[in-house]
Image: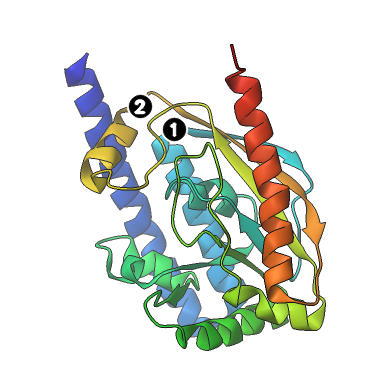
């Protein structure tokens, strides 16, 4: 069985690298022809997410109504697989930690698809990121972010940071929220888990079953209040499902 699992992992890794390489060429050509159009970048990002989902054996069930046009979407954050779960269904760019911009192989497509990188060690960087988010919204495309600022085990939701929600609060823009869940254990990447070991085990899984629930939107005139409302909505759904899956004795 270990041989089969290892062969599966190698095949999937090669498929991911191949799909990324294939998309890299039209991405760069399109960026030149469209002068860096956000619409083109998000289109390629969506197809890359679909390709990664297929390579990983990811099967996603969607409930609720996904947002469209110009929108901000927040979600709980369990794994880097979350990007494929969300990205395959929506035309958007992600706000991601700056470290991903230095990741080998995939960084070219991640950056080229319009991802907005944030330096989590610099409080001042939030203003630059907020301005970049507004540029995407003006292009009638969406922005997705994970306000926990890190991933968790999936059985609860960490407190939300509010800095990147300031623009939405000031403008009164509704912020959509979604809840992600995985059927299999081992998908979550959090805490001190070795990323290389976890990624290898992820590639070895026969399949990954995910659910994303587009559950609605909230508004608030204060960014901290907005963050609290979103956290409450998402956490209540996560905790409820957790109790249903593991009822007390």
Crowdedness of circle 1 by 10 Å Cα count: few (<14), some, many (20+)? Answer: some
Q: Is residue 133 left or right of residue 204?
A: right
- Determine the residue positioned at 63% across, 84% down: 135
Q: Is residue 224 visible?
A: yes
The quarter of the rendered structure image containing the N terminus is top left
> What secondary structure is found at the residue carrying circle 2?
loop
Q: Does 52 sit above or below residue 167?
A: above
Percent across and percent down for residue 35 are: 53, 87
- Determine the residue positioned at 37% across, 51% down: 19
Residue at far left of view:
3
Q: Nearer the viewer, residue 144 or 246?
A: 246
Q: Is residue 104 left or right of residue 175?
A: left
The residue to which callout 1 is attached is 57
Percent across and percent down for residue 33 are: 51, 83
Crowdedness of circle 2 by 10 Å Cα count: few (<14), some, many (20+)? Answer: some
Q: Nearer the viewer, mark 2 or mark 1?
A: 2
Q: Nearer the viewer, residue 153 or 180?
A: 153
User: Is the residue under label 1 in contact with that under label 2 (CB below 8 Å)?
Assistant: yes
- Determine the residue positioned at 66% across, 22% down: 244
The residue to which callout 2 is attached is 205
């Amino acid at each position: 069985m270990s041989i089969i699992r290892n062969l599966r992992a190698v095949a999937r890794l090669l498929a991911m690298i191949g799909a990324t390489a294939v998309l890299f060429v039209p991405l760069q050509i399109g960026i030149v022809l469209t002068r860096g159009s956000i619409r083109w970048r998000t289109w390629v990002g969506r197809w890359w997410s679909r390709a990664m989902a297929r390579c990983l054996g990811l099967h996603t069930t969607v409930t609720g109504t996904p947002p469209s046009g110009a929108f901000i979407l927040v979600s709980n954050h369990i794994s880097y697989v979350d990007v494929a779960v969300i990205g395959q269904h929506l035309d958007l760019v992600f706000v991601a930690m700056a470290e991903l911009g230095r990741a080998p192989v995939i960084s070219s497509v991640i950056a080229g698809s319009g991802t907005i990188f944030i330096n989590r060690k610099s409080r001042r960087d939030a203003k630059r990121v907020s301005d970049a988010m507004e540029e995407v919204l003006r292009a009638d495309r969406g922005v997705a972010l994970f306000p926990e600022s890190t991933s968790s085990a999936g059985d609860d939701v960490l407190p939300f940071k509010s800095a990147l929600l300031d623009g939405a609060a000031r403008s009164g823009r509704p912020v959509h929220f979604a809840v992600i869940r995985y059927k299999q254990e081992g998908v979550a990447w959090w805490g001190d888990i070795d990323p290389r070991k976890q990624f290898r085990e992820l590639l070895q899984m026969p399949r990954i079953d995910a659910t994303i629930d587009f559950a609605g939107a909230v508004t608030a005139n204060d960014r901290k209040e907005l963050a609290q409302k979103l956290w409450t909505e998402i956490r209540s759904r996560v905790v409820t499902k957790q109790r249903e899956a593991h009822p007390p004795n």
